[in-house]
Image: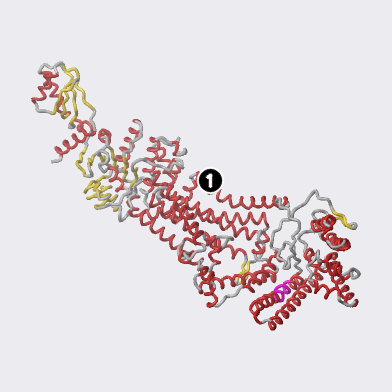
Amino acid sequence: MSFLRQIKVEIKSILKSRFLLVIAILVVASSAVLPVISFIVEQNRNRDGGGGGIVRPLPITAPSYSVVDIDIAYPEMSGQEPIVIEGITITSDNPFYWHINALMQEKDNLEMDKGRFSDLEVLDLVHSLIDEEIKYFALFAQHITEHTDYRIELAWNGTQKIYEKFIYEHNDVSADKLMEAVSYKMGLDPDSFKEKYIDITPEQRLEALDKLEEDLNAINKVAADNDFPQYINLRIQQEEDRIADFKEQIAIHEESIIQNPSQEDSLNTIIEELRRSIEIIETITIPTLQLRLERNIIPGEDTWENRALSDIEINRNQLLYTEIISEEEFNKERHYVLQYGSYEKYVRAMQAQIDEYNTAIMVGEKSLEAGKPDMKFVPKGSRNRTVEFLRYSIFVAMFAVLLGGWSIASEFQHGTIRLLMIRPKTRTKILMAKFFAALALSIAIYILGSLLNLIANGILFGFSDYAYPNYTISGEVNFVAYYLPKLLACTVSIIFAFAVAFMLSVIIKNVAVAVALPIACFIGCNIVLATFTYSETMNWLAYTPIPYVQISSFFTQNTMVRYILQRGIPLSLPYGIMLLLVLSAICTVVSVYIFKTRDITD
Amino acid sequence: MELLKIQGLTKVIKKKKILDNISLTVNSGEIVGFLGPNGAGKTTTIKLIMGLFRITEGEIKICGHDIVADFEAAMANVGGIVENPDLYRRMTGRENLEYFASMYDNVDKKNIDDVVELVKMSERIDDKVKTYSLGMCQRVGIAQALLHNPRLLVLDEPTNGLDPIGIKELRDLLKYLAKEAGVGVFISSHLLSEMELMCDRIYIIDEGVIIGEKTIHDNGESQEELIFEYTFVTDDNVKTFSYFNKLQTNCRMEKDGVVVVMKRSEMPSLIKELVNQGIGIYAVNQKHRTLEQDFISITTGSKKQIR
């Protein structure tokens, strides 16, 4: 009891130092100030429109898989004249504005470049083809005004049909001229062109035209009515068409193997690649589309469901392409041997990779199933911000080093130790009271700061995010249960830094050295870590305290420790925590022993 | 009653014997001086008593408690200052006292107010120590030593930085504590004159060895037995010199007179004799003794007294 009272007295005595008090207040306050700063910064960024001065017309490449987790900044064009086509006004912020603009320019340019065509009639054909295309896009532009709208993708997928329809409709023109005109817009092979579009019966032509008409109508309908289920059907249809196409190609290649056995190896590779593509479509793309329909997850919208879905898609894709090769093959691959050292390590690294993919898929599926997002799908949510703030432990560890280094050394430097050690308390008691007072203060500041940060994040970015669970291999955990153990683990870094500084304070009796040395060591650890991240040396460094001094780096993004873990180096967090605690205990015992046996001199 | 008992105390620092087999005692109600030049081992002895240094050999007992075996019980009975009274500069005088008070079981706010009153610091006790003069630090230093009503006081040159009035007050305070409260006081100094004014006994230490112990009964008597340097200014210095020379005393001619070193008690008869010889004496100056002379006088004096 009297020992606890003594600790209280010591804490009060530390805080009597105005310097330390001010620093302590600053450290605590920073935890609440940082979220406010990022809140203001993000608000400003949103107001700017996020252009950042980059001029980028349209995302030209039509994405075949809807990967939504990209933060594209679209330019906000002001001062551009709106385009008016058949009574439809298209303003410069329309997602199709630049494409339509470019098509119209193209028409003008063709006027100047007449010579490139064999005949003026061809030029006319190209003109009317481009006109068709402009009309087609203008229809979309009428209904679609947002850059993130899922229907944009549909628009791109339809252009081919416009061209085909154009060919069928102009059967009155000579085939050569028609081909010259259309090949200006799409790649054509003369033989197959004739076979597919010219040498057909009128019935076939009408049938094909009907089919195209129907398809285009369906596309237009989705665009006009925003018919999401219809969109999914179209997309599935598209994917099934692709499968059919791939299967056709496989059949052709298989045939050519029979005819040409010498090319078997290279053709087999192509076939294998095609089969994999089919597999991807069948097992990933189509089920994902069905899931979208089922849960009404509209692509393009910046929602967690989209992030979860694309995360599942990406990881399933990765999983399909990841395979562990046999030891024989491994030894043949020189760069693998160089990178991993041994087959065993390679297998471990690959297995870790596969586990990671599977976990990611599981987290995504569980989130969608429960309708409650894991924190990884809410990257700017309160949970992520709070977990990222575990890094704060290093900031507090520096403060703990300051306290520890100052604690005993300042008594020696100011001579106050002589009035302190003549009290009826053993040296061990006095030293331990000072030790636990400064340590308790450091940890209290850490917990208090983290709590403040948690609340500030909640206020600024929404408390509701905290209510969602996280998903782990062992099941669903609520955020408190997820966060608290990590917070406690991070205090171990603080304890270790403090114990080292305190020991130096006792041994060296100089505040500056006792504070500077641990900080220098910490920086040294980071340098060593950065230097050997990708080296064989890391294998034994994993057993030293060096990778563990900053425990928070196990929990936060983009840290050296994360990269090392990805390489399959056996960094173990429980081992690291135990190691730091044992070393801290040793430092403390050494401090007590030296302080007890040595004469008190300045 | 023996409040402090040191027996066979030896301290070795870096293979050098700083203290060699020291023994001394301080009794209840007694003020004991500890005299020695700089580097003699005074502060080392005090640091050993106060537990700042580890004992190489021998033992120290405070109120019967061995300071090694029973540190806390021993230290509960002793208060003191070692070297300068270095207080926590970031705190006020009162906060310093409160901090030290927290380490005793029997000290409350009233005790703190009392000792502050006693050392006359009431006006400034709530100011930061940063703003204190050395004398004020010394007063707070004495206050913290008295905080827990110790039975033994150990003071290391406590008059440093005090003004003459402060020194007088401290002297009176220590005498009062010794006579009225039965406190034992162990006080180190390199000024004999200061010691003589308040001490009952003096130990003299030099090069780590106690070279003398002197009991002072009262100021007058002790002065008589001490040896001083006297300068005789006469109308015939040569005759005076030859007279002293004949007596085989320690004497020499200087430009302002004849300098003689001798015991104070011999002076009246000598002056009478000189006058009888027809020498006119303008003045006899008793020179203030230097520390060196103190030692000479004390050691020779004590040797005569103690067998």
Residue A286 drawn in magenta? yes
- Residue under label 1, please give it: A22
| Foreground residue among B30 and B84 | B84
Residue B209 drawn in magenta? no
Q: From where the camera sits, is residue A139 visible?
A: no
Residue A245: percent from the left, percent from the top? 75, 76
Q: Chain of mark 1?
A: A
Looking at the picture, does residue A30 appear above or below residue A247? above
Residue B9: percent from the left, percent from the top? 24, 49
**Amino acid carrying mark 1 in the image:** Val
Q: Which of the 4 quarters of the picture holds residue A279? A: bottom right
| Foreground residue among A208 and A476 | A208
Residue A598: percent from the left, percent from the top? 33, 52
Residue B79: percent from the left, percent from the top? 34, 45
| Foreground residue among B58 and B144 | B58
| Foreground residue among A288 and A106 | A106
- Examine the residues drawn in magenta and state their main secondary structure: helix
Q: Residues within 10 Å of mark 1 (few under 14, many from 20)?
A: few
Residue located at (54% from left, 61% from top) = A560
User: The N terminus of chain A is located in which quarter?
Assistant: bottom left
A106 on left or right of A463: right
Q: Which residues are magenta?
A: A280-288
Q: From where the camera sits, is residue B224 visible?
A: yes
Residue located at (71% from left, 82% from top) = A255
A163 on left or right of A63: right
Q: Which of the 4 quarters of the picture holds residue A313? A: bottom right
